[in-house]
Image (cartoon, grey):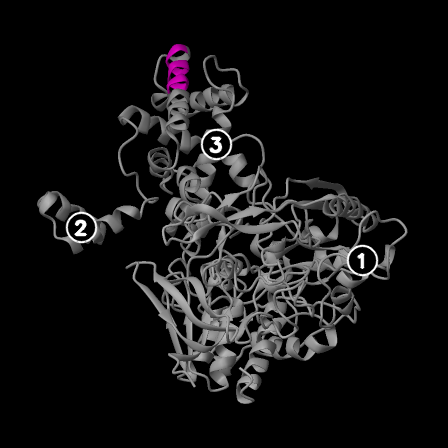
């Protein structure tokens, strides 16, 4: 069983003691709450939206000889960003884009995007990419694509398995043969 | 003899304050160093060091709403990044004002060590050309000192700080006491060879920087590990900071008392003896007011904050600062002009087989080449600019999505090289910092009011820099050459200087040739505020040299019982 982390313990204390929480514990809880930016502070997506974001992430950066966006936790990253990083207006735009994508899939193929076969999903995304999807803001596909890429290439899998991660290189070589690495160094 | 709390008080613990504390402590003085920011201990408080992007909040970028609320100025110095935002001032809690519509971007740190933890570490000497400039073209207060007087002090601070660089023999950028430079990459060497052959008066050299390439075991410091994450703090002590270098040296003497969270609001002054008699502070957490006394005071609070403290140190029964008998206190506020960029791409060829292993903390530099021997025939401005840059390769974003995009993102694009221009800003007497007549901050300090703008000379220089940049890129054989001039606002370069300028004439300047206040013999002002011009090079190394020199002089005067 995984150990509950300090944040979970403190959050539990907050629920249990409520307003009578002792000042030192309350301060610790506040500090832990300020450590945002890792998991969504509240749910933004319903189950259908979460499935849709997961399916989009998978098609944009699928598993190949390395794990893809879903294994790298990109859908949860996107929900965190929507919950805690985006402005309310930008969040509404993103949710409207998701709705337009599912509407299109339903109208064209009779199913929600997440329920389509991957070939059909790719067709829907290609339509979105070319700006040919009625009701979808022109920048939505690119926006989605960038979010997935950001989440993936900054994830532990993206840095360590897809790219080559050198936390402490120790030396610099300005003429290092690309053939010896064959990949991109994560920064 | 009055009974003092300390032999010396150093106000501020950044690059200048750290040096003042080290030098004074090592000369046997009991020193109190004060900083308005929180305590940051070397290694222990570098909380984001060694973390991967997935271990940083928001994967490294603060939410825009938080930036807009708390870091709307500090963002220009990098505070929108979650690996370092804890080293910056909260702008909401520390307001200031502008006169008229001219903005000023004052980027401030928020901790002991000041900007030494987050600086760019470029360390370049001034030359005699630069010390002559004010006298020759008639702008600002003439410098009372020349290169020869500062050269031994440059050597002194370079040896301790650990500066990596190459010896070039350039008159406009004197060589120093260097460790070996950080190597150029294969593309930079390619550009250097072609540029210097096509345009022999242009040089492309290693950037000289305070990131060591050799260990300093006597200081417990290890050479650069090529992480290029300096702004998080460096537990190797590979770059010069107060925490890695001057603070341990000062502490080792047993003579240092360091107090964080102490906001200095004013200096007490005795007009009869023309001496500082006390340093007034407010505790940033408890709001408790307390004054400290000392025989000597070093004011190193950062250029703008030092001027604010001086302006707020008023003669008894007067609105006028004790330090302003010249009427020049708060005048000649300067910052380097920047945000002009140029770039080019190395044509496809044999260099494409190479990439960079490791991440250097610096790059390459094109030293000043304009108006070196009087006025160039084809310039419509005085003085000049330098260019900082570097070559690199990045993954190129392919179109589309899916497995083919993922595979495409495993390949590097071509070598590109890009430069950012730093141009000298002339000292204009009416570029000023004053105190607001009624508005105060949470410590009761009158708000700073900036009235500072760049002018025709800076604008012309930047136009020339963009044009010359493109000429150089093309001459070197690069393709896809371009340039861009973004809006440049004073403060952007975080090289703010002036306000308490150095000069021989007590009627025109605030401090003398020893960085000693004309109006108070026991006060030394050695940070950016006492610079009478900016040159075009990064200023910190010069602050270090001037501070060490002033500390030596102050102790000599104290021994002779002059102060």
Span highlighted in magenta in the image = A99-107
Which structural element holds mark 1?
Answer: helix
The residue at 50%/54% (across/down) is: A164
Q: Chain of mark 2?
A: A
List x then y, in percent, for residue B335. 63, 53
Can you name the residue that lies furthest to the top here?
A107
Residue at the outermost bottom position: B560
In the image, residue B345 above or below residue B501: above
- Gap in Å between the C-alphas at discs 1 and 3? 55 Å
Q: Which residue is mark 1?
A: B137
**Gap between marks 1 and 2, in whole Å?**
63 Å
Q: Position of residue B269 (x, y in %)?
A: 47, 69
The answer to whether B69 appears left or right of B504 in the picture is left
Q: Are marks 1 and 2 in contact (CB under 8 Å)?
A: no
Q: Name the subunit of mark 3.
A: A
Nearest to viewer (mark 1 / mark 2): 1
Q: Which residue is mark 3?
A: A145
Q: Is residue B152 left or right of residue A33?
A: right
Which one is closest to the eye, mark 2 or mark 3? Answer: 2
Q: What subunit carries mark 1?
A: B
Q: Residues within 10 Å of mark 1 (few under 14, many from 20)?
A: few
Instruction: Name the image quarter holding the N terminus of chain B.
Output: bottom left
Which label lies toward us, 1 or 3? Answer: 1
B553 shown above or below A66? below
Secondary element under disc 3, as helix, strand or loop, is helix
């Amino acid at each position: 069983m995984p150990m509950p982390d300090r944040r979970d313990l403190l959050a539990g204390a907050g629920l249990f003691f409520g307003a009578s929480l002792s000042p030192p514990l309350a301060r610790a809880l506040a500090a832990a709450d300020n450590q945002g930016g890792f998991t969504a502070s509240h749910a933004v997506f319903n189950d259908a939206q979460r499935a849709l974001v997961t399916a989009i992430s998978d098609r944009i950066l699928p598993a190949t000889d390395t794990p893809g966006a879903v294994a790298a936790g990109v859908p949860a990253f996107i929900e965190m960003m929507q919950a805690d990083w985006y402005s309310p207006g930008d969040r509404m735009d993103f949710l409207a884009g998701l709705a337009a994508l599912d509407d299109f899939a339903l109208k064209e193929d009779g199913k929600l995007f997440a329920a389509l076969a991957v070939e059909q999903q790719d067709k829907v995304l290609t339509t979105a990419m070319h700006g040919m999807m009625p009701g979808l803001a022109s920048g939505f596909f690119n926006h989605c694509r960038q979010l997935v890429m950001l989440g993936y290439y900054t994830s532990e899998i993206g840095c360590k398995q897809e790219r080559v991660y050198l936390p402490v290189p120790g030396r610099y070589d300005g003429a290092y043969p690309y053939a010896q690495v064959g990949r991109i160094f994560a920064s | 003899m009055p009974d003092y709390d300390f032999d010396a008080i150093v106000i501020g613990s950044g690059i200048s304050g750290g040096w003042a504390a080290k030098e004074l402590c090592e000369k046997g003085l009991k020193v109190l160093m004060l900083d308005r920011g929180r305590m940051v201990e070397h290694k222990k408080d570098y909380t984001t060091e060694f973390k991967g992007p997935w271990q940083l909040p928001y994967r490294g970028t603060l939410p825009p709403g938080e930036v807009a609320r708390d870091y709307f100025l500090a963002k220009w110095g990098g505070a929108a990044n979650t690996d370092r935002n804890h080293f910056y001032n909260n702008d909401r809690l520390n307001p200031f004002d502008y006169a008229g519509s001219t903005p000023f971007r004052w980027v401030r740190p928020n901790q002991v060590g000041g900007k030494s933890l987050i600086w760019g570490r470029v360390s370049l000497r001034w030359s005699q050309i630069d010390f002559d400039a004010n006298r020759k073209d008639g702008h600002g207060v003439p410098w009372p000192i020349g290169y020869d007087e500062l050269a031994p002090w440059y050597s002194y601070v370079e040896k301790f700080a650990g500066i990596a660089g190459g010896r070039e023999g350039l008159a406009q950028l004197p060589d120093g006491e260097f460790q070996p430079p950080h190597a150029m990459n294969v593309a930079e060497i390619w550009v250097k060879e072609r540029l210097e052959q096509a345009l022999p008066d242009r040089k492309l050299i290693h950037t000289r920087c305070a990131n060591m390439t050799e260990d300093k075991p006597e200081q417990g410091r290890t050479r650069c590990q090529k992480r290029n994450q300096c702004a998080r703090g460096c537990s190797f002590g590979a770059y010069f900071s107060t925490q890695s270098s001057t603070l341990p040296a000062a502490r080792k003497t047993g003579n240092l008392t360091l107090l964080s969270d102490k906001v200095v609001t004013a200096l007490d002054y005795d007009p009869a003896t023309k001496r500082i008699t006390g340093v007034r502070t407010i505790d940033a957490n408890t709001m408790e007011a307390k004054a400290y006394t000392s025989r000597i005071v070093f004011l190193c609070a950062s250029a703008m904050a030092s001027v604010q403290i001086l302006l707020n140190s008023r003669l008894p029964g007067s609105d006028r600062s004790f330090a302003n008998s010249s009427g020049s206190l708060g005048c000649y506020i300067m910052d380097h002009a920047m945000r002009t960029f140029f770039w080019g791409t190395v044509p496809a060829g044999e260099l494409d087989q190479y990439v960079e292993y490791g991440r250097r903390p610096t790059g390459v530099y094109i030293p000043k080449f304009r108006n070196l021997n009087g006025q160039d025939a084809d310039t419509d401005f005085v003085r000049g600019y330098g260019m900082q840059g570097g070559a690199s390769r990045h993954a190129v974003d392919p179109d589309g999505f899916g497995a083919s995009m993922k595979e495409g993102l495993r390949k590097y694009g071509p070598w590109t090289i890009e430069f950012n221009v730093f141009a000298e800003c002339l000292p204009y007497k009416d570029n000023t910092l004053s105190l607001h007549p009624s508005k105060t901050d949470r410590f009761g300090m009158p708000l700073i009011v900036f009235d500072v703008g760049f002018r025709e000379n800076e604008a012309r220089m930047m136009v020339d820099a963009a044009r010359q940049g493109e000429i150089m890129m093309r001459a070197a054989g690069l393709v896809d050459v371009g340039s861009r001039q973004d809006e440049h606002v004073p403060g952007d370069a975080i090289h703010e200087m002036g306000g308490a300028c150095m000069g021989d004439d007590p009627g025109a300047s605030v401090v003398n040739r020893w960085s000693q206040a004309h109006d108070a013999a026991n006060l030394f002002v050695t940070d950016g505020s006492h610079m009478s011009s900016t040159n075009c090079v990064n200023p910190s190394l010069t602050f270090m040299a001037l501070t060490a020199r002033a500390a030596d002089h102050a102790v000599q005067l104290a021994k002779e019982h002059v102060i």
